[in-house]
Amino acid sequence: MTAARAALPFAAGAAFVAAVLLTTSLRLEGTAAYLDPGWDRHYYREAAERGPLAFHVAPYCWRVLVPAVAWALGPIPLAWSFLFAAVLGAVVAGGATWLAARELGHPASRAAGALALLFATGWGLRYQLADFWLPDAVASGAFALCILFALRGQPRAFAATLAVGVLAKESVLAAAPLAVMLGTAERRWPWRLLVAGVAVAPALAGALAVRWLVPAWNDDAGYIASLPPVISRFPEIVAGYDYRVLVRDIGWDERVRGFDLELARAMTTGTFGWLAVGLAVAGCAGRPRLALALAPSLLLVEAQLLVARDTERLVAFGAPAVVLLAAEGAALLERRGLLAAGEFAVLAFGAFALALSGGREAFGLNHGVHGLLFALGLGVVLVRSLQRRAWRATPRG
């Protein structure tokens, strides 16, 4: 493989990132969006200002990677360090998703379609680039790389990526179940589980070590009062950070007892869009083993909702897995003659264009408009199906 071909997936990811940056309002210092108090970005900036081990508001203080890098770069303005990390994470997420699609045997057109759907995800990479102070883009890149290394059966690369990614955000642990794919060359389950355990152990150790090294002082009124007003004026946001309390108050009371159609939509089509979800369902039928391998990670992504009130922002971490299943769905339809080669990419780029067309501050998906795009694709499939039936019913000779 030439250097140019090796760089193509990441160049494609960079092109999508450039398109997003040109059509999105960034949370730059001094802007009204940045100054809005109480938002996560202020905690990460403060962690970078003080040093990664000198900030003690959970869970932000345990996501040390990006603030530590920004702090270590010293003379470089913090905004540039955080922006560079977010851009790099998004480019890696795109490139890794393209390579994963190719690893699964998809042609370049289908890989490009998967990439377009990845960047079309509501409250996904576009928002992660807009609010570049967050470590979410880096976490997304790590999650996508874990999928790629699991598909390739590269345990060392998988373990290293998972361990580093968890230091960016604990959400990357959702990729841990993919480790069982690493031992597929050896079909005995005890061996596969051993390989998986060894691959996941460094990430778990790192997550626990950070929590030991950086204790949470969320309920220390004096410490909270010493922080900048954009944080100290809202002590109730971080007070009593206890997973047991969060599961009770958010997981049970809000998510389980309060489950409704709006939440169901946010967990599926409201985040990924009708096109991605519809094709992913078809992809489960087309490649059930891949679906079963990705399912535990997707369930863990959704399980974040049990301890946090953000919905689409958290669900969007599963986008690399969903769009790979969508590519499988497109492949199934192409094999059955219901989609022509390249039509999946056209529909996916349409979804990306619709995601950008909502405005510079629109990060959620327009459910109705994306539904129309899905209806268009479904119409193409139905017409092709009717044409095939008519052709088969036509007498020969």
Image: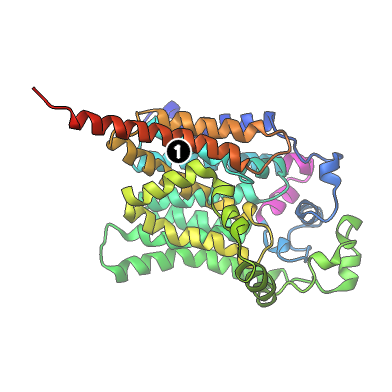
Q: Residue furthest left?
A: 397
> Residue at point 33% right, 65% down?
192
> Residue at point 78% right, 44% down?
78
Q: Secondary structure at mark 1?
A: helix
Q: Could one spot residue 150 in this view of the protein?
A: yes
Please determine whether, in this image, residue 368 is positioned above or below residue 258. above
> Residue at point 46% right, 28% down?
346
Please determine whether, in this image, residue 265 is positioned above or below residue 232. above
Report whether 181 appears left or right of 88.
left
Residue range in magenta is: 65-81
**Coordinates of residue 287 in the picture (x, y in percent):** 32, 50
- Residue 256 in which image quadrant: bottom right
**Coordinates of residue 270 in the picture (x, y in percent):** 59, 48
**Coordinates of residue 397 in the picture (x, y in percent):** 8, 22
Q: Could one spot residue 7 in this view of the protein?
A: no
Tally of marks: 1
Q: Is residue 25 magenta?
A: no
Tell me if mark 1 has few (under 14), some (14-19) or many (20+) residues whose alpha carbon lies within 10 angstroms of its own: many
Q: Is residue 71 magenta?
A: yes
* Coloring basis for residues: rainbow
The front one of 49 and 136 is 136
At label 1, the amino acid type is: Trp
> Residue at point 28% right, 37% down?
335
- The secondary structure making up most of the magenta span is helix
**Coordinates of residue 357 in the picture (x, y in percent):** 65, 31
- Residue 392 in which image quadrant: top left
Residue that numbered label 1 is attached to = 98
Q: Quadrant of the N terminus?
A: top left
